[in-house]
Image: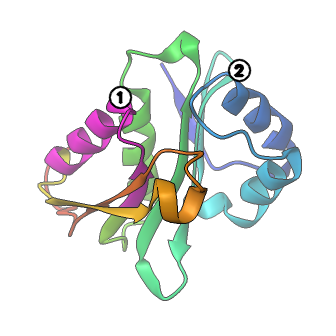
Amino acid sequence: MFSLRHPIKEDGVGIHNLVKQCPPLDVNSRYCNLVQAHHFRDTSIVAERDGEMVGFITGHRVPDRARVLFVWQVAVSPAARGEALGNTMLDGLIGANPDIEYIETTVTPDNIASAKMFGRLADQYSAPIEKTVLFSRETHFEGLHEDEVLFRIGPLQQDQPH
């Protein structure tokens, strides 16, 4: 059984350590994770089991589109994989932000698990997914990183049973 809550500043190092266990996620600085836990706490979520952090989602509202939640990273500990924790956290995050109409995130083409997770989310909320390349390998990453494909999910049907 997982418990979900918003992060606090003191979670920053734990978040950093969790992300390091979750390739291919980009490992940000500890400072970045502290700022995420502090400034974006309302649009981020931590999952714990038996007092141990086993999942984290960081997100933020898109500045010029306040009803859009951009999901930056979803990290699930190897010890909690295969238990639909990513979708449980996404559902908790949407429930904590009931005015959200769209979820946006980027997924690299080789990240099949994330693509499936966001596909399940779209099904759960009876929402279409639009996919377009947001950041291109050649244009934005000098060929050193895969394309980042924008998944735009919505509008969310939050009155649907979950």
In depth, the one of 135 and 127 nearer the eye is: 135
- Image: magenta residue range: 104-123
Q: Residue at 70% x, 28% y: name it.
A: 18
Residue for badge 1: 113
Rendered image coloring scheme: rainbow
Magenta stretch: residue 109 in it?
yes
Residue 41 on the magenta segment:
no
The kind of secondary structure the magenta stretch mainly shows is: helix
Secondary structure category for the residue under label 1:
helix
Quadrant hosting residue 49: top right
Image label count: 2
Residue 82's image quarter?
Answer: top left
Q: Amino acid at mark 1?
A: Ala
| Left or right of 38 in this view: 84 | left
Mark number displayed over residue 39: none
Q: CA distance from mark 1 to mark 2?
A: 26 Å
Q: Kindly identify which residue carries mark 2.
A: 51
Q: Nearer the viewer, residue 113 or 68?
A: 113
Q: How far across and down, in percent of the image, does residue 160 sit?
A: 13, 55
Give percent across and percent down for residue 60: 56, 66
Where the C terminus falls, by quadrant? top left
Please state which amino acid type lies under the numbered disc 2. Answer: Gly
Residue found at the far top of this picture:
79
1 or 2: tag closer to the N-terminus? 2
Q: Is residue 59 visible?
A: no
For label 2, the SS is loop
